[in-house]
Image (cartoon, rainbow, N blue to C red):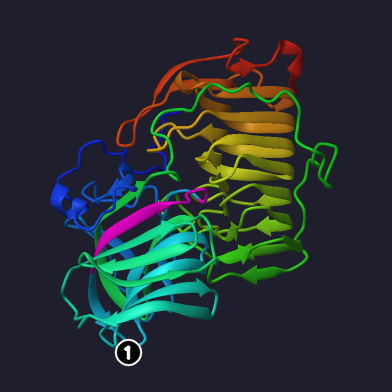
Amino acid sequence: MQERRLPGRRPLLLAVGAGVTVAALAAGMTSAFAATVFSDDFSDGDTSGWSKSGGTWTVGSGVLSQSNAGSELARQFAGQTSWTYYSVQARVRPASFGSSSALVGLAARSTSSTKMYRLALLGSGRAELQAVNGSSITAIGSASTGVSTGTWYTLRIETSGNTIRGFVNGTQIASGSNSLAGAGRIGLVTAYASGGFDDVVVDSSGGGTPTTPPPTTPPPTTPPPTTPGPTTPPPAGWPTPTSSQKVDATIAVSGTFDGGLKRYYGIGDGGQSESQDPMFELAAGATLRNVIIGAPAGDGVHCEGNCTLINVWWEDVGEDAATFRGGTTYTVDGGGARSASDKVFQHNGSGTVYIRNFRVENAGKLYRACGNCSTSYQRHVVIDNVVVRDTDAIAGINTNWGDTARFSRITIVDDPDRETSICVKYKGVPKGSEPTEIGEGADGVNCLYSPSDITYQ
């Protein structure tokens, strides 16, 4: 199967690209924020690496635009939930405001779709630095800047411990101490407004992400602590939903969400188009269990940190069933997925994905370690007690980055010619390039299994 372009971010820049000048970066920057760890000027014409929630977003002429001024809250997120001390800067151009409180702005340390620090250009003409926690908004500081539509403004948020600072066109408009969030992603936001965004840059002195794989770490040999869930392979049939619920916006999950085997459907177009909203967005440490995800399913489940998926079923995978990022340990226990034209599970973050007691049917790959994200990690997957039918490959990993895939109790059904690849090896590359397939099969180093681990029925 031909490798499709995987979600990622623009390569980290050692020299500033065409869309951002050295002077613009240097203006107002403190020496503590010296290393550029992320940038995007949207000159590639897409939003690869960004996660959309609400709004109508398009890229044209090197500008990311949100055109739905009636959207209550439209957001695009990028980066890692582990980012701590950093500065994020972007050029922002309001196009329309629906009211004096409508806004177009920039976010930092976002821990969920509704929890973040936000530097907002308001319809009232003011700029305000805010701590946003759902419907609770605390103003850290503000200033009258004469905000007008059609004008570009350079916004910057600096985070250092509990100190948060906001700048407009190089001038500090607010500074204060706030403990809402100690780490989190960056974001571009509008609320009852439309606008454009360009030249996003993140500089960091301590919270950035590596541009090359971290030092080699021993791959996992045992599963994580046992979580409540199935201990045997899933049944041959698929569960019958107890009821169905149409979903119009991403469901944010913190703690545990038990769906009681209800079917949730209704987000996205049911296809492989990039940057669709997820059906569920799991905060770090969250658990999703007993859920059936129907079609259309958008981008399935996003895990923004460590997460656990127990007895979750995808009836028709859209873009991806689940994307893992921001954490170090992710567990899929029970459930199944079918009709994934590309891959089921996408691993963008670091750490290890555990997949056990699972069923996959009619898919490209069960698991893929991102081969061209701008942040390259060493990633691991442990796959145990899985039933596979009509699937091209079980796992794809990047051996040049030290990825490993470990397999046990794999049952492959209706494959008399043994066409299903167990472990496909790739050479990982920077964002903007395509990974190269370089081989497959057990090697005792990256692809770990023996013939007794694979059963054909």
Q: Is residue 143 left or right of residue 337?
A: left
Q: Residue at x 42, y 58 (%)?
A: 159
Residue span colored magenta: 81-92
* Residue in front for this viewpoint, 117 or 295: 117
Q: Residue 311: x, y in percent?
A: 75, 49
Residue type, label 1: Ser
Residue 54 visible in image: no
Instruction: Say whether residue 311 is left or right of residue 201.
Output: right
Q: Is residue 214 left or right of residue 285?
A: left
In this orientation, which residue lies closer to the viewer: 268 or 255? 255
Q: Position of residue 293 (x, y in %)?
A: 64, 57
Q: Position of residue 83 (x, y in %)?
A: 47, 49
- Residue at left offset 63%, top offset 21%: 218
Q: What residue is pinned by disc 1?
A: 100
- Name the one closer to the observer, 44 or 364: 44
For residue 266, above or below residue 311? below
Residue positioned 68% across, 16% down in the render: 449
Residue 84: in sight, yes or no? yes
